[in-house]
Image (cartoon, grey):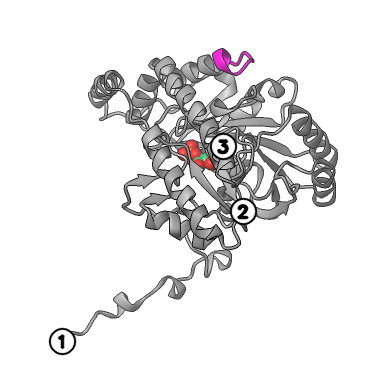
């Protein structure tokens, strides 16, 4: 019939027999707006250098010749190179048997929750923190517990220990440096929470170090020694400037690596992904050079924001949390009106800006200085 739509077109998500805990929920995702300066998703602003692009093309061409076959299911060459990188930069020797890789650290976290969480089990994080920890918990049927933080966004150790003792969670997330606040966590804090978690359950403690290469402090990687329930998760999305690659990894006791094999999909890491990641690892030194530039830019943002009269949380990441605003969303909009996209993570009074190129950061600083003028007028 002219103009009539088939019944199936009117069907919405609410009409489907989805799991009860997913009803009425929205998918995770920052707005992808087409504006000149995009500083909202903690990406690295520097495109991969041309010699690396050429090397990726070479390695991918090599991989393409074997695409009729499934890839190396255990990604041994890649895990070996990741172990070498961690040993070189993380202050602790690790071998291939300590390392596992997946499509982004989000998938690493998902595999950990599938293995150690799940229905009837719980995970705790200290919020505000990376909201995907709670969302992946939900997706894997794991109950989520929101733990406390201090006013200055550091972890309130005594309160966290109590929350762990009270709830006896199966998985504990500690994000260092933390997203969205930029706050690094002291090794003593991790040790205290690890002890509390072992006394309460024992549970798996996941230290999410997605941003550690930008930190003023050393990696917490050495803490895995002698602690079989401690996992450090990492990513190539930030320091390696390869968010589009989707490559995350973990370091832990070999038994943890064996455990995640129980839930990983066979051949989860494509031959193209493995080849690309290996090419990027060949260029580690160049990529870490960009990290040094970004650390300087991050420190400049902190200083300039404070000079402009904003409150700023000390940052060990490639982003900076600044405020305070009576209405953070209105401030976000005013900055956007000037062509600069930052992130409103829903932390009352605060916004987050990712360190970009010097030109992008100048545009952001102009926008926030202008905002300050408007607000004090
Ligand atoms: C703390 C933290 N962990 C993990 C991730 C996920 O990174 P990816 O899945 O790209 O490795 C992010 C991304 O923003 C993050 O902020």
Residue annotated with mark 1: 1
Distance CA(mark 3)–CA(mark 2) = 14 Å
How crowded pointer 3 is (Cα within 10 Å; few <14, some 14-19, many 20+) is rated as: many
Q: Position of residue 188 (x, y in %)?
A: 78, 29
**Disc 2 residue crowd, few under 14, some 14–19, many 20+, Cα 10 Å:** some
Does the numbered disc 3 mark a residue whose Cβ is under 8 Å from ligand 1? Answer: no
The crowding category of the residue bearing disc 1, from other C-alpha atoms within 10 Å (few below 14, some 14 to 19, many at least 20), is few
Give the image location of residue 104, x and y in percent.
Answer: 47, 37
The nearer-to-camera label among 1 and 3 is: 3
Q: Residue at x 58, y 65 (%)?
A: 21
Say the numbered circle drawn on residue 324: 2
- Kindly indicate whether the residue at mark 2 contacts the one at mark 3 (C-beta within 8 angstroms): no
What residue is rendered at 62% in x and 30% in y?
Answer: 232
Which mark is first along the chain, 3 or 1? 1
User: Residue 302: which disc?
Assistant: 3
Q: Is residue 92 magenta?
A: yes
Main SS, magenta region, reads: loop
The answer to whether the residues at label 2 and label 1 have Cβ atoms under 8 Å apart is no
Seen as rendered, the residue at the extreme bottom is 1
Look at 61% across and 57% down and name the residue there.
349
Q: Is residue 334 left or right of residue 255?
A: left
Name the secondary structure under disc 3. Answer: helix
Q: In this picture, which residue range is highlighted in magenta?
A: 87-94
User: How far across and down, in percent of the image, does residue 75 sit?
Assistant: 44, 24
Residue 272, percent from left and from top: 32, 29
């Amino acid at each position: 019939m002219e103009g009539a739509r088939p019944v199936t077109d009117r069907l919405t998500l609410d009409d489907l027999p989805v799991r009860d805990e997913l009803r009425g929920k929205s998918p995770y995702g920052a707005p992808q707006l087409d504006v000149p300066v995009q500083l909202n998703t903690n990406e690295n602003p520097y495109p991969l250098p041309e010699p690396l692009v050429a090397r990726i093309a070479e390695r991918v061409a090599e991989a393409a010749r074997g695409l009729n076959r499934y890839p190396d299911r255990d990604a041994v060459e890649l895990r070996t190179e990741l172990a070498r990188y961690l040993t070189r930069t993380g202050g602790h020797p690790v071998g291939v048997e300590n390392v596992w890789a997946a499509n982004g650290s989000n998938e690493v976290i998902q595999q950990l929750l599938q293995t150690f969480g799940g229905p009837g089990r719980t995970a705790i994080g200290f919020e505000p923190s990376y909201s995907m920890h709670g969302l992946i918990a939900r997706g894997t049927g794991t109950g989520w517990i929101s733990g406390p933080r201090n006013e200055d966004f550091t972890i309130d150790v005594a309160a966290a220990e109590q929350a762990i003792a009270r709830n006896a969670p199966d998985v504990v997330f500690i994000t260092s440096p933390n997203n969205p606040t930029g706050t690094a966590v002291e090794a003593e804090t991790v040790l205290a929470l690890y002890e509390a978690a072992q006394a309460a359950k024992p549970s798996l403690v996941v230290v999410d170090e997605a941003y550690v290469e930008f930190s003023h402090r050393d990696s917490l990687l050495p803490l895995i020694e002698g602690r079989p329930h401690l996992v450090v998760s990492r990513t190539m999305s930030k320091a390696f400037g390869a968010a589009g690659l989707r490559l995350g990894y973990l370091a832990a006791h070999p038994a943890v690596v064996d455990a995640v094999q129980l839930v990983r999909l066979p051949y989860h890491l494509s031959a193209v992904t493995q080849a690309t990641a290996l090419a990027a690892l060949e260029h580690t030194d160049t990529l870490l050079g960009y990290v040094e530039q970004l650390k300087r830019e991050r420190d400049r943002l902190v200083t300039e924001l404070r000079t402009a009269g904003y409150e700023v949380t000390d940052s060990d990441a490639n982003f900076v949390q600044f405020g305070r605003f009576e209405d953070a969303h209105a401030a976000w909009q005013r900055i956007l009106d000037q062509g600069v996209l930052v992130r409103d993570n829903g932390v009352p009074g605060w916004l987050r800006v990712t360190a970009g190129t010097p030109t992008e950061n100048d545009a952001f600083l102009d926008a926030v200085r202008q905002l300050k003028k408007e607000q004090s007028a």
